[in-house]
Amino acid sequence: MTEVVSNISPPPGSVATVSDAPPIHYMVKIELFSSLGKNAVETYESGVFEAGGYKWKLVLYPNGNKSNNVNDYISLYLAMVDASSLPRGWEVNVIFRLFLLDQTKDSYLVIQDAAGKERRFHGLKLECGFDQFIKLSTFNDARYGFVLEDTCVLGAEVFVCGERSRGKGEVLSMKKDPTASEYAWKIVNFSELDEKRQESQIFSTGDHQWKMVLYPKGKGLGMGTHLSLYLALDLATLPAGCRVYADYTLRLVDQVYSRNYNYYRKGRSWFGASSSESGWSSYISLSFHQSYTYLVVKDICIIEAEVM
């Protein structure tokens, strides 16, 4: 049985009813409730529960949500959990009811939005509820039985009305002070390499992994005349739909004169699923080891990548 409450003022835009039935999705019992305020516990989050195919929790402010300038009230909210696993642009419409047990009458005060209003949860709004769930003076009034032996019981029911993706979007995130990482690739028996694609081992820079790609006899416009050299992003470490912008240097290391005569080229590019490699098809002439004898020593060539 459910009846409208006339002697308790509900939060703005909501209605208060009394129900004999407990909440079907979650209940939380708080013992020594007054100790929350005495110990300056500003907020309490319940355990996680499932409803409508999603995960939720209750967020309680025992003395009001001060960030919203709430005083003299208990603030209570429903919050979505684990939203990071949802697809980009997700949106969930929900009708929910929040409960407070009258332990004397064994009935529940139920607060919900008026006229069955739906609340919309999305990536920028994971929490909805009531700043003024119940006035503290009413909550502590012995006539209602909301607090008995310093214990109260709260609950929630959550009904998902609809869900959809709002379409595509993106986030551009920049590194304020990016740092560069270096990796050296030592290639032995360099003169014996054929035209096959050669790859360095994977190395890490920031949150991503990279490798160098070498075509010893050239590729594309450099085929047969130049060595082709590229930096490649390992797509296995890149979330779907994302791209990475990087400054990079690929250099042939001077092995004789303490790097005074390194041969290098600098580049910058966006890396992603549609273009995971960037570099030069005509990086250096195939006869470079004859002109620059310090770059290939004892048939060993060392190629370094510096990525930021």
Image (cartoon, rainbow, N blue to C red):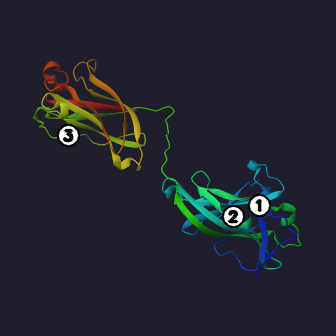
Q: Which of 41/290 is in front?
A: 290
Q: Which tag, 1 or 3, sits closer to the chain's start?
A: 1
Amino acid type of the residue tagged 2 in the rendering: Lys
Query: Callout 2: helix, strand or loop?
Result: loop
Query: Callout 3: helix, strand or loop?
Result: strand
Residue that label 3 marks: 198
- At x 49%, y 47%, the residue is 169
The label nearer to you, 2 versus 3, is 2
Residue 43 percent location from the top left of the image: 71, 56
Q: Are the residues flagged by discs 1 and 2 in contact, CB closer than 8 Å?
A: yes
- Per the model, the C-alpha gap separating discs 1 and 3 is 67 Å
Which mark is on residue 145?
A: none
Q: Which tag, 2 or 3, sits closer to the chain's start?
A: 2
Above or below, 125 relative to 221: below
Residue that label 1 marks: 13
Query: Callout 1: helix, strand or loop?
Result: loop
Which quadrant of the structure image shows residue 224?
top left
The label nearer to you, 1 versus 3, is 1
Residue that label 2 marks: 117
Q: Residues within 10 Å of mark 3 (few under 14, many from 20)?
A: some
Q: Residues within 10 Å of mark 1 (few under 14, many from 20)?
A: few
Above or below, 282 relative to 93: above
Q: Which tag, 1 or 2, sits closer to the chain's start?
A: 1
